[in-house]
Image (tube, grey):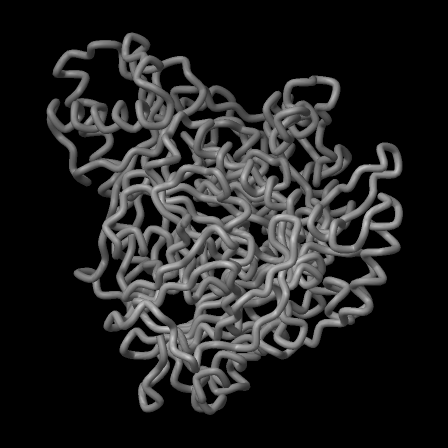
Amino acid sequence: MGQDRTARQELCYLDVGGTFTDAFVVDEHGDFVIGKAPTTPQDISDGLFAAIENAFDAGDIERRQGFSELKIIGYGATTVLNALLTRRGEKTGLIVTRGFEHLLLIERGKQTWTEYDRRDRIHSLTHRHLNPIVPRNCIRGVTERVDGAGKVVIPIYEHDVRAAVDHLLDQAVAAIAICFLWSFLRPEHERRAAEIAEQMISERGVKCRVVTSVEVSPVMRELSRANATIIEAYTSRLAHSAFAEIEVGLGTRGFGGRLQVMQSSGGLASPSNVKAVDTLHSGPVGALVGGRYLAELYGLDNMITTDVGGTSFDVGLINHGQITIRRDPTAARMILGVPMIEVLSIGAGGGTMARIDPLTNRLQVGPESAGATPGPVCYGRGGTIPTVTDADLLLGYLNPDYLAGGRIRGDMSAVQAAMKSMIADPLGIDVTAAAEGIRQIIDTKMRTAVVGLVEARGFDLASYTLIAAGGGGPTHCAGYTENVKLAGVMMLPYSGAFSAFGSSSADYAHHYTRALNLIVPPSPDAAIKVETARHLATVLEEMSDGAIAAMKAEGFAPDAVTLRPQVMVRYGRQLNDLIVPIHTRAPSSAQDFDTIIEAFERQYEQTYARAAKFPQAGFHITDVGLVASSPKVRPRLREYPLVSADPSDAARKPSRLAHFRNDWHDTAVYDFARLAAGNVIRGPAIIEDRTTTYVVPPNQYVEIDKLLTLWLKTA
């Protein structure tokens, strides 16, 4: 994991979380160092540069030289998601097909309960319509109509478009989104409306962007397509302004390489080509991409990635080496028509706050977070409400003199006072019991999320290896995996920056989607199969030419670009389709069609159940997709020779009392940097690192393998 001091720095990947910003710097040999700094919400770039410089310092790299040597800096963050949640985007107008002006108010039934917990989902009285981003007075209808076969039924009424644009500009909108009912089959109407709008904006001399659904999300389902288009219009300037500020700041520090942005679908792209809506979950998906990389290295098929950050607990699944892509994902309770890696996020992290419910007098933990500002009470930055990190400190798991690698000194007296006055005294218990209660509640929430995500799909937990990552993952994984039968539990030496690590292992990629509406009857004859296959080939050929041209324009040689085609298929009359990778970009025969359908049915069986298959309903191909990617340097996980099971004396630090199972134990403490492959650490034990703390309860132990991965096992 250490770096050759003479090696040139190649890559740096960043994950801007709600509490901390992580940096993962990789040199020309694939070796890496990790940096961490508090996130600075008022100006994200401050925390971002501080994290990079912290990594340089850890690797004894001169800062100016380090920035000048880097060829690529990758960036993943929740900037767009946060703007959406806090409604900090720009005022946006919407132009739709006349008669659908109430689209955002009507919604879909699913959108009224999506992201609710299980209890609230089953009670319709708890379902609430969203407060739309675009108010009704900023939505205007235009006469036009294309039918489901892509035929123009009513031409676009251009005077309607002009009247709509006039009205929206009078409302001082900063962006106009255009979404017509069947535009994904015939985009001409949207494009013509955009031309008229651009001309009128120019004539008025105002600043206003125009965004069409066919350029953002050219897929079926008008609500999810409209949502994606609106988010793009609402947040695009904010996202690209952040990218521009980062690029300027990097330039002043001597960086002359390329900035890349992590996308929610798992690939990297340049800021000029990435859409704002494609970055909604760009932070959390890095962990899943990293999990897939580790699955390849260890030869494992099924993995669960868990990432305990300061604000959230993110869980993802890798099944048979594949990451699940959601066709209709949700963000801020909005259903979107853009593919995203499936990540379950709950409000549970180090900064999650604890309170007493005034009605029930019960202890509640989360989902609110103290974030980076003011942060936990122990940070001494003005926080007054006890958090999970404060509880960990009181229980002896964290070293008050070594928070964030020693850059933060924990204020124990402030933590004890806050825990006593806000939690312990109202419940009539002592401070230790209050801290233990907080930890048990948060661990249970995390365990429920892990078990629910797997079992709800009918999968066997015992076939999955779990990765405990994030700054708090190794601290809490013994709690949230307790009594859960898993194939194994991994804690990583780079856990504190795992999402950034995952981003560094991702390929440079662009994702393309084209809507279709191909309905195939049950038991189709050979002629129908051939016709369908050739239709797919025609669309894929056009998409491939465009993808190669785009990658070439960004400096990639065509022979270095890999194209992976896929189709979105569902059974006839069903609502949910699956993204199915296909074997060729030029299907032409009945056999090619059969191969595609066989792949769909295998995936359907894995996702739902064999009994749920329904080929008697025929098949509906709704979209065709293409992923264009090019490989790059990945971090190298160096193998170390195995040594004795007993840690060296140099690895031991002064022991301290820590609380396990309702009692205090004299607990051995180790410095991870001085441990070696082959060491076995028996609990109770605590292992301290710059970016995380590993907690081993009395009944468990860890084995360190050749890659310095710590495997948590039960004695």
Q: Measured from the top left, where is residue 618 in percent x and y?
A: 29, 13
Q: Foreground residue, 488 or 264? A: 488
* Horizontal side, residue 521 vs residue 403: left or right: left
* Horizontal side, residue 13 vs residue 364: left or right: left
Q: How many marks?
A: 0
The residue shown at (66%, 48%) is 84
Q: Quadrant of the N terminus?
A: bottom left
Q: Measured from the top left, where is residue 426 in percent x and y?
A: 88, 45
Q: Within the image, what quadrant is residue 99 found in?
A: top right
Q: Foreground residue, 207 or 314? A: 314
Is 494 placed above or below 51 here? Answer: above
The residue shown at (38%, 85%) is 69
Q: Measured from the top left, where is residue 16 in percent x and y?
A: 57, 63
Is 677 placed above or below 464 here? Answer: below
Q: Foreground residue, 284 or 657? A: 657
Is 455 placed above or below 279 here? Answer: above
Q: Measured from the top left, where is residue 317 in percent x and y?
A: 40, 41
* Horizontal side, residue 358 vs residue 243: left or right: right
Residue 671 in sight in this render: yes
Residue 245 in sight in this render: no
Q: Foreground residue, 84 or 466? A: 466
The residue shown at (76%, 72%) is 411
The residue shown at (22%, 36%) is 582
Is 86 placed above or below 76 here? Answer: above
